[in-house]
Image (cartoon, coloured by chain):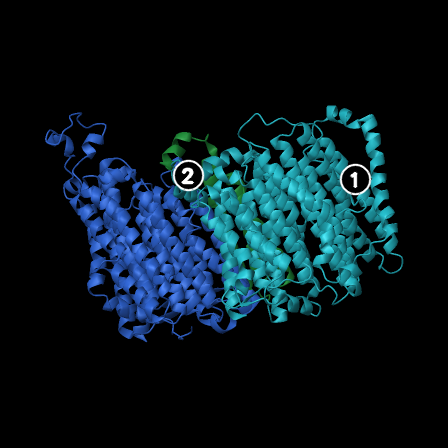
Amino acid sequence: MNAPMIVAAVVVVVGLSASFAGVAIRGRLRGLVTMGVGTVVMLGVAGPTRPATLGMTLMAGITLAGMLVFARILARLIDGDEPDRRGIDEARR
Amino acid sequence: MNALAWLAPVALPIAGALLWPVVGPARRWLLVLAPLPALLLGVFGAPGPPPQLNWLLLEAIADLDIGSRPLLVMTAFVWMVAGASARRIGDDRPAFASLMLLTCAGNVGVLLAADVVTFYVMFAWMTFAAYGLVVHHRTESARRAGRVYVVLAVLGEVALLAGLLLAATHAGTTAMPEVAGSLATAPGRSMIIGLLIGGFGVKVGLVPLHVWLPLAHPAAPVAASAVLSGTMIKAGLVGWLRILPLGEVALPGFGATLIGLGLVGAVLGVVAGTLQSDPKVLLAYSSVSQMGLITTAVGLGLVLPDDATAAVFAAVAYAVHHGIAKASLFLGVGVHKAGTRGWSHRTLLAGMGLAALALAGAPLTTGWIAKQTLKSVADALPEGGGQPLTLALSLAAAGTTVLMVRLLWLVREPSGPRSSPRSDAPADARGVIAPWASIVVAVAVGGWLLPLAVPDAPSLLPLTTSGLWDGLWPVLLGLVPCAGWLRYRPDRRLARASPRPAIPAGDLLLLIERLAPAVSIPAWWLLHRFDAMERRARTFQDVGRVTVRPGALIDHLEDRLTGWRTAGALYVLIGIAVTVALALGTA
Amino acid sequence: MSELSLAAGVLVLVVAGPLLGAVLAVADHGHASSRLVGLVTGLIASAVTVLSVTVAGSGTPLTLVLLAGPGLELTLVADGLAVAMVVMTTIVAIAVAGFATSEDRESPQARHPRFWPVWFALWSALHLLFLAGDLLTAYLMLEAIGVAGAALVSLDGRRHTLLAATRYLYAELVASMTVLAGIALIWHQTGSLRFAELGPELSAHPEGWLALGVVTAGLLLKLPLAPVHLWLPAAHAWAPSAVSPILSAVVVKSAFAVLIRLWFLASPGLVTRHGAQLLGSLGVVAIVWGSVVALRSAHLKQLIAYSTVSQLGFLMLLVPLMQAGSADAWRGGVLYAVAHALAKAALLMAAAVIAEDAERPDVEAVIGAVTRRPLAVFAIGVAALSLVGLPPSGGFVGKWYLLVASLRTGQWWWLPPILVGSLLTAGYLLKLLKRAFATDDLATSRPTASPVAGVGAAPEAAAEPADVGFDARGALALALALVTVVIGVRPAALLELIDIGAPLVTGGG
């Protein structure tokens, strides 16, 4: 691993712990975004600078961004209304 | 028989943890007996040379070097005492007892492991098992402490894994002495050493990695605080002593950094600790301060390769002294919480006073021996560097005196038995007084047994009559501001102005948390936002998990497994385990 | 040449067919008519048939380079593993498509307009994943599958399904990004992501250990393997009835396929005995833990979800046995994956029909189901046969090969978990069957039932639900379950297919 990769890997680890230890959906989402930035950077600086790395990084970055947007939409849908205890109790049954 | 002597110290606590739910009422003594094989191994030594445990992990190697043996004795003893005082908690909280035993196994294993892989596995084991002890009370503060603990622990483990893997790859072996030796010539030496210092530094409480310590140590029940602050904190020190190329090569840069950070920690611990009003937080800060002094010893070893043996001895002597004294103070606070009146309160004050004197390094106490050893190493610094350093050490001792007076002040009032039956303290104070008394005896005599355990100790112990004064004056100096404070009581006015301590527990962490939005470091930003989101979190955590029927162990376990934090910890552990397993087969 | 281009066309069609379905469904405003669904599935089914016949006939894997641009390589590799998985996906998907159109006929307005497009896209992504020849494509498809799966779970928009979908998506995201970080490490080391080229490059080196370890951890969370199964019970139990069969049967196999491809077909030089034994041990944990929680579950679909947790553990046993050099392990593991998919999908479809009838989500819904839904109950019985591993069924053949492999390699310690796991499986499935054949106690526990208690006095009319006519969905479930029996009776064809392009066993210890 080169130095930029190690830095990016640390960001990934921080994001990983935040996505698990984060509080509430938004907290986890922030962890996920951090992790996503870290992984994409990690991929971007991983290879020798050639078009292949760039192409891969773009592909991975765009799809990841798409997933994160969807994750945000879900978080909005849930956070939008008041917590509905009835639904939760139903889910627990 | 020989292999048994080496394996039982780790195997017995694990067996105890597994058997805890099935053994009858006698099980509470498991907490006391489980560390016994480790104590015996430390005191009497092994019947034979360390066995090659080829079948275990990656050809595990066990060994006890000159530094680990006194630490093993201290660790096992503190665990026995802590186990004795916790034995009643285990009755209604089986998980707590099992976690204590598991953590004990990891802690002892760290001291016995002599190869990189076993050492790392034991270290990680201890770290993650102790998480359960930190969050035991499930209060908001315990949860917060647990979060900070886990974040820093995971970062530390990652740094350690990277450093150990790189070092072992260069050495071509996993045996720790060889790995440490070859580290001197490894390419990228600075990065590896930096990773290792940082990785172990989290456990040691190296400034600025200490922020978890004043939160986590007080959050646990007192018995767990005693082992956290007394013995587990020393595991990081053992890591440094084992893996850093002490005596092989001079590393003035790293050494000076460690000395500097150690002194900063010593001062910070005293200042922040004195401002606390919870005796357990104060004691945790005292640990930061004392570990700072031990860090200074390690730094000296890096600067002066010729005096490395003396530096290692100083660090170990100090660690043994601090482990016993700090554990006895924590347990003393536990006794105080459980309730003391009349003669029992006077005994408590006397015992805690003795331990406090030892920490301050008053003449003829164990702390005095430790500090004198440390100063004699510092004197070896070239170009007159020794004098300022010894002076700094003496001033730190004066600061410790202030801190200890503050502690005794906090526990000065007798306390009745607590009205609420639901508390961590055992209902009956008698159960905790006896273990506490036994460790106070150890504080009094323990340090004097040290020369017996280490063969060439007398030559390393520079005890002179002039040293008596050397130990006395800082204590007297420390008493001066205390007298002034008692006369004018400025704290009353301060307390009226603001009920919270001027430096809250976690010091730098709060600063970072407050600055976080400005600098927008995502992780700290998250920590900052945690508390506000806790309520909504519950609804998110609950969905799709099993219904927990009262008393059903399986339901409880599954409920825990499907929680994000447990799953996250397991996820990281699985990742590490697969990586290690891949490394094992090929090395 | 023409033969090759035919094969290439078929391969493309296998992936593009479902995509075409998605486009047509969008054009149809999401309300895919049964004619459209029938047309598209027919097209895909014929393409898959041609593909499997071609590959089985030639006996060699079929490779097709579609794109070779920098960073955008796309190579399709149709070896035995890929074709077996594609066939499995297609069979399950056709049954589920029939199931869903039958639901649509009964209540045309109930279907969310985004269901069919996303569902077809998921199908396409699954095919492309199984056929992918490089790690990046596999990764992108894993992402697509995760998003599509979570989207399908979330469609009904009720709060707890949204929560379950979020839980699913977030876990998928963490796993995806972990895999991507591992891919970055592999790329840094080898400069290639093609499975076929990783072998010699990814060797015993700290970075190599880390790379494979990180990717493996991500895949285990995606699978998911207990004890990191936090998302599965919620997502699978709360998914709509036309979605959970696909999720539990096929989607969980996607990470499995990538995992064994990476460990054995890409054969990096650093797969070790320790690593393989660790994965096997985690499999044992999953087998036991999933079954134990399933035994205690009172919620019908949750019980089946935990059964999936347990069955995924069986699949993991392939890893240590394969590493020990047993070709039987490959056959057993892959065949078990196929058999499990068919049986689990049948079980979930039958359970959905029965639970809908009884209007309650717990296991008590099954009581007396045999009189109301005989076909569905029969499907549960046949599926149970395969899941427990009794002959003649695909589940039996798969477990048999795993047992043989563990005896041949001397790793006898996998025998007890396989046997105990089968017993526990029998335990929780018998819990369902016993209730299904019980006399209709449900009548007395139902609030609408007549208060008259007594064995002979219960009025016939109260116990008899409205006439449902021919139970098309129950029949579909039964047909799907019977496919496992066909595999059990005549496993040779499938086994020969699986052997094509199987990893060479080195006979390592």
Q: Chain of mark 2?
A: B
Position of residue B126 measured from the top left corner of the image (x, y, whole percent): 57, 52
Q: Quadrant of residue A92?
A: top left
Position of residue B342 measured from the top left corner of the image (x, y, whole percent): 68, 27
Quadrant containing the C terminus of chain C is bottom left
SS of the residue under disc 2: loop
**For residue C212, which numbered disc appears in the image?**
none
Whichever of labels 2 and 1 marks the residue nearer the N terminus, that label is 1
For disc 2, the neighbor class at 10 Å (few under 14, some 14 to 19, many from 20) is many
Q: Which residue is mark 1?
A: B401
Q: Which residue is mark 2?
A: B543
Residue A28 relative to residue B334: left or right:
left
Q: In the image, which is nearer the foreground, mark 2 or mark 1?
A: 1
Above or below, comparing residue C509 to residue C180 in the picture: below
Residue toward you, B317 or C150: B317
Q: Is residue C101 visible?
A: no
Residue depicted at 15% across the width and 30% down the height: C462
Q: Tag 2: residue type?
A: Val
Report which colour depicts chain C: blue
Residue toward you, C264 or C37: C264
Which chain identifier belongs to the cyan chain? B
Q: Tag 1: residue type?
A: Thr
For disc 1, the neighbor class at 10 Å (few under 14, some 14 to 19, many from 20) is many
Q: Chain of mark 1?
A: B
Which chain identifier belongs to the green chain? A
SS of the residue under disc 1: helix
Residue A25 relative to residue B201: left or right:
left
Position of residue C477 measured from the top left corner of the image (x, y, whole percent): 22, 50
Alpha carbon distance from label 2 to label 1: 53 Å
Residue depicted at 88% across the width and 53% down the height: B387
Position of residue C9 measured from the top left corner of the image (x, y, whole percent): 32, 66
